Image (cartoon, rainbow, N blue to C red):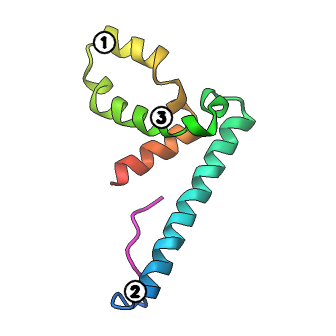
Amino acid sequence: MTTKKPSALINKDNKDEVVKLHEAYVNEIKTSFSAALGKDRLYQRAVGFMQDQQIWMVGVLVRYFVKKVLSFDHADFMKAMKEDINPLLGELGIWALTNYSMR
């Protein structure tokens, strides 16, 4: 997923066009999210077994991984990799990390 910029054909002063553009972006993100989660469930990866109400935790894990785990000493890093980061190792984790890096 790449950072999108409004098309030159979109009239940025027309609120309806901007709203439709935003809806298209959200729909694209929802579709790619569902595809990634579907693959994880199909291949029975850890994140595939999370309930829908727990999926937001993947975002929390992404922030935790980027802000904290990467700067741990090696022993704590390895422990976090074994115990905490399992849901990030699937398609959904890659999707979340990619979107987080695009911010």
**How many numbered circles are shown?**
3
Left or right, 94 with respect to 100, comes to right
Residue that numbered label 2 is attached to: 15
The magenta segment:
1-6
Depth check: 33 or 81 in front?
33
First in sequence: mark 1 vs mark 2: 2
| Depicted 6 relative to depicted 64: above or below | below
Residue that lies at the very extreme toward the front in this rendered image: 53
Snapshot quadrant of residue 53: top right
Q: Main secondary structure of the magenta part?
A: loop
- Whether pointer 1 and pointer 2 mark residues with C-beta atoms closer than 8 Å, the reply is no
Query: How far apart are labels 1 and 2 at the CA level?
Result: 51 Å
The residue where tag 1 is placed is 74
Q: Position of residue 17 (x, y in %)?
A: 46, 86
Q: From mark 3 to mark 2, how far is it between C-alphas?
A: 34 Å
Circle 2 residues within 10 Å: few <14, some 14–19, many ≥20: few
Q: How far from the left and from the top, in percent, is residue 26?
A: 51, 64
Name the one closer to the observer, 73 or 47. 47
Secondary element at tag 2: helix
Looking at the picture, which amino acid does disc 3 mark? Met
Judging from the image, what secondary structure is the residue with disc 1 in? helix
Q: Residue furthest top?
A: 75
The reply, left or right, for residue 4 in relation to residue 51 is: left
Tell me the residue that label 3 is attached to. 57
Report the amino acid beneath label 1: His
Q: Nearer the viewer, mark 1 or mark 2?
A: 2
Quick one: quadrant of the C terminus? Answer: bottom left
Q: Is residue 14 left or right of residue 44?
A: left
Query: Which badge, 3 or 2, comes first in the chain's sequence?
Result: 2
